[in-house]
Image (cartoon, rainbow, N blue to C red):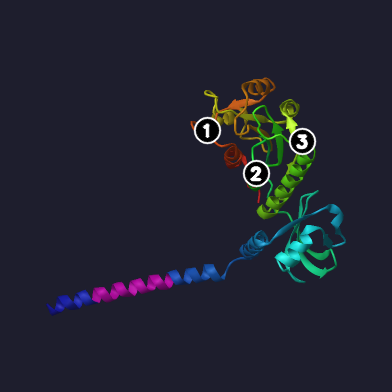
């Protein structure tokens, strides 16, 4: 019995030694990997860290005229936002985008003037938030403030342009001063959403058009999607597969969405004859403010390329 116990103890000690050697071996290679990163990995780490810092910074848009000799001049409502809302001080950094050329800068506040903030350009960087898929939404005028929600979420999801359209079943009718005020407000909402989502452009909100006017633009698109709740044969998935090739790098797509009451059959037939593809979005009827969000998400998921 004593001999058997001694043998078992010897085997146990041997196993423990082997385990400790394995641990030391693993620790050595972990140490070698962690503390001896090559320069390329270190540079990539610093680049990635800086990029993440940029994404967390607030972003503002300027005109090309405001960029000059290593400085950027912030004017207008952004001055109040930086000074009194964000409470930034000299030396604080943020992102600025030239809305004309889509060029991005990281800047530092140099000084505050009465109605201007002078910033020094720290770097110009090439990261882009813009997609290779350009989507133009033609939205039938909805009631209340639904258009504001549609614009805000569409800009966040990457829309390039939004055009409100008057249709037969639109309850809302915009005339004269009301139309001008609405367009100005919608443009402001698009700008705020572009800042929040880190876009490199402020998507254009166009003037209100008629169904006849928008059909004149159909030839410039790779695909024009007309969403119609009574369509029973053509579904979005099949239409996208048939009409868009996977190898094409840049896409230009138009989406036509009706108001709350849907699109009149005469308008559907007219736009279909002019090149629009009439599609169903499935077995359930979506609210007009849900359609743009749904389609943009699907199209960006399927065709957008991550170039960063």
Q: Is residue 94 magenta?
A: no
Q: Which residue position is annotated with label 1?
A: 285
| Mark-to-mark CA distance, 3 and 1 | 30 Å
Circle 2 packing at 10 Å, graded few (<14), some (14-19), many (20+), is few
Magenta residues (range): 10-25
Residue lying at 71% horizontally and 34% vertically, measured from the top left: 173
**Residue 53 relative to residue 24: left or right:** right
- Across and down, in percent, residue 107 comes to 77, 64
Q: Is residue 13 magenta?
A: yes
SS at badge 3? loop
Which of the two residues, 46 or 167, is positioned nearer the viewer here? 167
Q: Are marks 3 and 1 in contact (CB under 8 Å)?
A: no
Circle 1 packing at 10 Å, graded few (<14), some (14-19), many (20+), is few
Residue lying at 42% horizontally and 73% vertically, measured from the top left: 24
Residue lying at 72% horizontally and 37% vertically, measured from the top left: 163
Q: Earlier in the sequence, mark 1 or mark 2?
A: 2
Residue 135 against residue 108 in the figure, above or below: above
| Mark-to-mark CA distance, 2 and 3 | 17 Å
Quadrant of the snapshot with the N terminus: bottom left
Which SS does the magenta portion mostly show? Answer: helix
Q: Are marks 1 and 2 in contact (CB under 8 Å)?
A: no
Residue 50: image quadrant is: bottom right
Which of the two residues, 126 or 33, is positioned nearer the viewer here? 126
Of the two numbered discs 1 and 2 in the rendering, the one whose residue sits closer to the viewer: 2
Whether residue 128 is visible here, answered yes or no, is no
Q: Which residue position is annotated with label 3?
A: 175
Q: Which residue position is annotated with label 2?
A: 145
SS at badge 2? loop
């Amino acid at each position: 019995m004593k001999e058997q116990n001694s043998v078992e103890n010897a085997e146990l000690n041997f196993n423990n030694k082997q385990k400790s050697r394995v641990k030391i071996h693993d620790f050595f290679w972990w140490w070698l990997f962690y503390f001896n990163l090559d320069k390329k990995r270190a540079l990539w780490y610093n680049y990635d860290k800086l990029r993440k810092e940029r994404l967390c910074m607030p972003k503002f848009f300027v005109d090309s005229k405001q960029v000059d000799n290593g400085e950027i001049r912030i004017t207008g409502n952004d001055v109040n936002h930086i000074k009194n809302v964000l409470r930034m001080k000299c030396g604080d950094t943020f992102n600025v985008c030239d809305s004309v050329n889509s060029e991005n800068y990281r800047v530092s506040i140099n000084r505050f003037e009465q109605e201007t903030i002078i910033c020094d350009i720290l770097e110009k960087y090439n990261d882009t938030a813009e997609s290779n898929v350009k989507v133009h939404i033609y939205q039938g005028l909805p009631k209340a403030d639904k258009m504001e929600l549609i614009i805000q979420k569409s800009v966040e999801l990457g829309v390039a342009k939004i055009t409100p359209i008057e249709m037969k079943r639109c309850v809302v009718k915009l005339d004269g001063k009301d139309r001008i005020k609405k367009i100005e407000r919608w443009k402001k909402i698009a700008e705020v959403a572009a800042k929040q989502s880190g876009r490199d452009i402020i998507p254009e909100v166009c003037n209100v058009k008629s169904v006849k006017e928008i059909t004149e633009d159909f030839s410039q698109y790779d695909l024009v999607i007309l969403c119609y709740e009574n369509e029973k044969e053509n579904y979005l998935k099949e239409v996208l597969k048939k009409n868009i090739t996977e190898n094409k790098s840049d896409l230009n797509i138009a989406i036509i969405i009706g108001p709350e009451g849907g699109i009149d059959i005469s308008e559907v037939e007219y736009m279909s004859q002019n090149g629009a593809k009439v599609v169903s979005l499935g077995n359930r009827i979506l609210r007009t403010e849900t359609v743009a969000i749904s389609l943009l998400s699907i199209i960006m998921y399927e065709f957008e390329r991550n170039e960063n």
